[in-house]
Amino acid sequence: MPAPGTRIRTITIMDDAALYRLMAWLSPSYPVGAFSHSHGLEWAVEADEVSDAAALESWVEDVLRHGGGRQDAILFTQAHRAAAAGLSAELEEIAELAAALNPSKERRIETLSQGRAFLIATRAAWPAEFEPLGEPGSDETAYPVAVAVAAAAHGLPLRPALLAYLHAFAANIVSAGVRLVPLGQTDGQRLIAGLEPVVAEAASAAELATLDDLGGCALLADIASMRHETQYTRLFRT
């Protein structure tokens, strides 16, 4: 028996096919257009709120713990559970909530455009029995819901799928920061390594949360996405 207070690590076993799918779907090369979104970071860099590696790490950490990352994790968890259980009506409600629950126009564009692109590519290359989420070309499926439904439809366990999603979410913002600040690629990888426990913490919190826990307080990140709409010179779509 482990000593009191000893942390026990739980390992989820996935088969090769499940791991392969996760690696493919959440790879930077998957055609969802993630490279064109900075989650408002471009304005933060312009405003000198993020000007070095330490500031970028703090920014991403706050988004994961208190902002869009936390919200996506909760929506992902609830959508995966509903899809896995075949609760179509509940899944539709989650999808509608995810599409509506965005603090800015650009944040809505970001999640819906990536969700649409993900479903089109996945339904074409990785066909499965998807729960009804509108027509295949629908613009109304948020990205975390789209990935969660695909994962459930292919029998991928929640925990590794959620971790992979959050890693990709964080890595995309870091990648934007590497280009915008700018930083070196090695600095970017150090940041991603340093965010590992934050991603795990966000996933664990989401697994215990309900839809009633949705919300956030990463206010500067939300304001940044609003200010980005009218930013004069832009490299990123959001």
Image (cartoon, grey):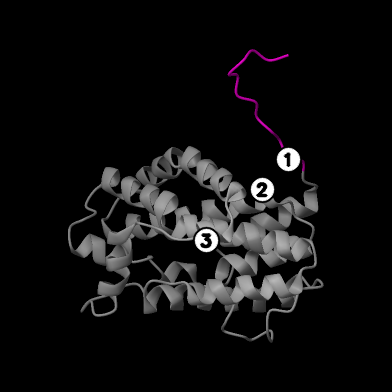
- Kindly identify the residue that appears in the image at 28 percent across and 43 percent down: 54
Q: Find the distance from the CA under tag 3 to the CA under tag 2.
A: 15 Å
- What residue did someone put label 1 on? 12
The image shows residue 198 at horizontal and vertical percentages of 46, 42
Specify the principal SS of the magenta part: loop
- Kindly identify the residue that appears in the image at 44 percent across and 60 percent down: 215
The image shows residue 149 at horizontal and vertical percentages of 70, 66
| Dot 3: element | helix
Q: In which quarter of the image is the C terminus?
A: bottom left
Q: What residue type is labelled 3?
A: Asp
| Dot 2: element | helix
Q: Find the distance from the CA under tag 3 to the CA under tag 1.
A: 21 Å
85 relative to 186 in the view: left or right:
right
Could you say which disc has been placed on residue 160 in the image? Answer: 2
| Contact check, label 1 and label 2, Cβ < 8 Å | yes
Q: Find the distance from the CA under tag 1 to the CA under tag 2.
A: 7 Å
